[in-house]
Amino acid sequence: MSKVKSSETVKVVVRCRPLNRKEAAGVTGTPGGKGGIVEMDVHRGQVVLRNPHALPGEPQKTFTFDSVYDASSKQRDLYDETVRPLIHSVLDGFNGTIFAYGQTGTGKTYTMQGAWLEPERRGVIPNAFEHVFTQISRSAADRQYLVRASYLEIYREEIRDLLDPNVHAPHVPNVHTQPPHILELRESPESGVYVRDLTSCVCKSVKEIEELMNVGNQVRSVGATDMNEHSSRSHTLFLITVECSQTGPEGRQHIRVGRLNLVDLAGSERQAKTGVHGERLKEAAKINLSLSALGNVISALADGRSGHVPYRDSKLTRLLQDSLGGNAKTVMVATLGPAPQHYEETLTTLRYANRAKNIKNQPRVNEDPKDALLREFQKEIARLRAQLSHREGRGKHRKEDGCDGEGDEEGEEEVEKERNLQEERLEEEKEAIREDGSLLAVEKQRLLGEKEIMMGDLRKERDTTEQLTAKYKVMESKLLVGGRNILDHTNEQQKTLEKRRQEIAEQSRREREILQQVMVQDEETLELRETFSSLQQEVEAKTKKLKKLYARLQCVKAEIQDVNDEHVRSRQELEQTQNELTRELKFKYLIIENFIPPEEKNKIMNRLTFDPEEDQWKFQLLPPSESQMKKRLASAVGYKRPISQYARVALAMGAHSRYRVGE
Ligand code: ADP
Ligand code: MG
């Protein structure tokens, strides 16, 4: 493994959905608005945002990204250009993350999931499932894979396991109404931040993993009074872990582990906080805590100057710590709506995305981690195989002094045959004993008993072997082996088509990169060309340059104004929240000061400690009090416990009537 840390930036792409029917009706009604406010230059990877309330002469806002997808873009385009390379990397042992960010209703879920049943409109997640398993089936035969999946949701800063088997056990009635467990985050030096007790299911096929996703989606909607509101306020993470083992040139097995996070974030719009109290206020403050923390993390990383990155501020940022500025390849899909009424939000999304472009990650292949599950599976399979072949060996040994137990299926059959033979022989012997007139009845019984025991042993052995074989088969079926084209029904023509499509995607990506470079160079050369043949020419050139610089100055000024406005707005919101919180605090104080005895209050205060891991105040266990600390009396010699003089005499007197204790 190379020790050189290569770094790469977070890949940021922007997608704009078409105007929906309602918006289209509104837009055509607005004077001057022909369509949406978002214009995209797909070849250059540029987005131009038109301000519907622009003052005359106000420059348009232009942003450049790795790629942009306009309203006519297909799910496949985004997948082939942007996601496919990432999935390849995950299969090679890198960590990968794709997250969709944007206002509610701009197409985050459409991009991540899409319409599952329509091949053309399937989103990133179903396409990635298909891709992972196809790729495994096409890989070299010396590779073994183990694929696992987990699905979780962060809602109001609580992590819920969407695959919790206790929540959706199909045979338990009414169990659906029970919400999933709330899980905790933990951190360990080896595996970084992880979710404790998160269910992780081994998947052998696309069908199985899709089934998991469906189950999780169902659990998600359980208990949500309004699914639309719930989904716009919660973050979902689908995690796929792909472990791959391959024999290296020196004959040793290497395991690489790639983790893929597929993230659908909550809607980025501001939640109106005015006029909410109590519980509702707490909720409002918590809903977007993860999202605003994500914003702060991105700003801190993009800025590069501030040393402290506030990952610990929210659950989401802790979970995505590796994906932002760490060991992962990350793609951010920012989704936009083209409607003029959402200009502000759209601009904020673009700014956000623009900032994320500067985040540098250090992805590396995760090789031979200590906690690879694949290795444990392999060990267990080897152990079971050894046990089985030992049994087979023993079976054969009885018959013809053993031969080695290669060829599982044949061996099994032979052993089975051998066992049947033995059983038949025992039956015959039993029959012979029964019919043998020369034996005494007692003797007969004894011999029959012996044979019975032998039969019992034989059966027990068979049961154990059957159990072992079943276990072995289950374990082995979980490991996927490369080169087995079970899923790959595609014919050669389709494969070529797929390859061509990938080549085209790669080509257009490169073209865009070159175009973007040319644009940058153009500006530079314009500044460098200093020799002029005439004064007139010089004036012209300089005027042009001046104009350009002036336009840029205007852009920057507008930008400063916007950023200032945004700051003012968010400060006002924070102040509002603070006011609400202070008011609530005063209320609580009033109750405490007036209705709770001071000594009780002090007792409680002294016992409370804050647990930063769980973000909660906790009661400390009371130290045992003085009276409880008193040592128990030592027992009198010969007696089990201290005993009174009276009882002692009573005991000594036996059943003397004077000392009889009432019964
Ligand atoms: P979000 O998850 O961001 O709240 P959705 O994915 O639910 O938004 O999208 C809102 C609506 O817009 C859905 O009805 C969806 O089908 C539609 N939509 C979103 N993006 C596109 C797109 N690129 N093409 C066509 N329809 C889209
Ligand atoms: Mg959604």
Image (spheres, grey):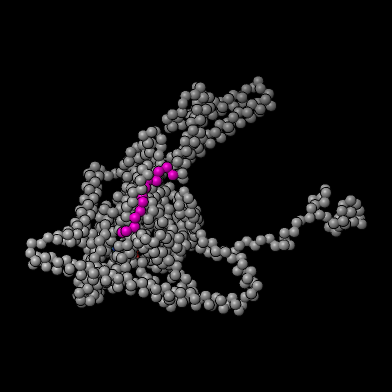
Nearer-the-camera pick, 335 or 93: 93
Nearer-the-camera pick, 559 or 120: 559
Q: Is residue 517 in sight in this rendering?
A: yes
Ligand 1 falls in quadrant: bottom left
Q: Where residue 403 appears, x then y in whole percent?
A: 47, 24
Q: Is residue 116 in sight in this rendering?
A: no
Q: State the residue lying farthest toward the top.
A: 438
Q: Main secondary structure of the magenta part?
A: loop
Numbered label tally: 0
Image quadrant occupied by the C terminus: bottom right
Give the image quarter of residue 204: top left
Give the image quarter of residue 23: bottom left
Q: Where residue 8 appears, x then y in whole percent?
A: 32, 52
Residue at horizontal 43 percent and vertical 40 percent from the top: 476
Residue at horizontal 23 percent and vertical 62 percent from the top: 46
Q: Where residue 222 appears, x then y in whole percent?
A: 44, 62
Residue at horizontal 35 percent and vertical 40 percent from the top: 482
Image quadrant occupied by the N terminus: top left
Is 197 on the left-hand or right-hand side of 432?
left
Q: Where residue 224 appears, x then y in whole percent?
A: 44, 66
Q: Is residue 505 above or below residue 287?
A: above
Is 587 on the left-hand or right-hand side of 378?
right
Queried whether the magenta region covers residue 175, the answer comes back as no
Q: Which residues are magenta?
A: 357-369
Is 416 on the left-hand or right-hand side of 620?
left
Residue at horizontal 14 percent and vertical 66 percent from the top: 542
Nearer-the-camera pick, 450 or 578: 578
Q: Is residue 44 above or below residue 23?
A: above
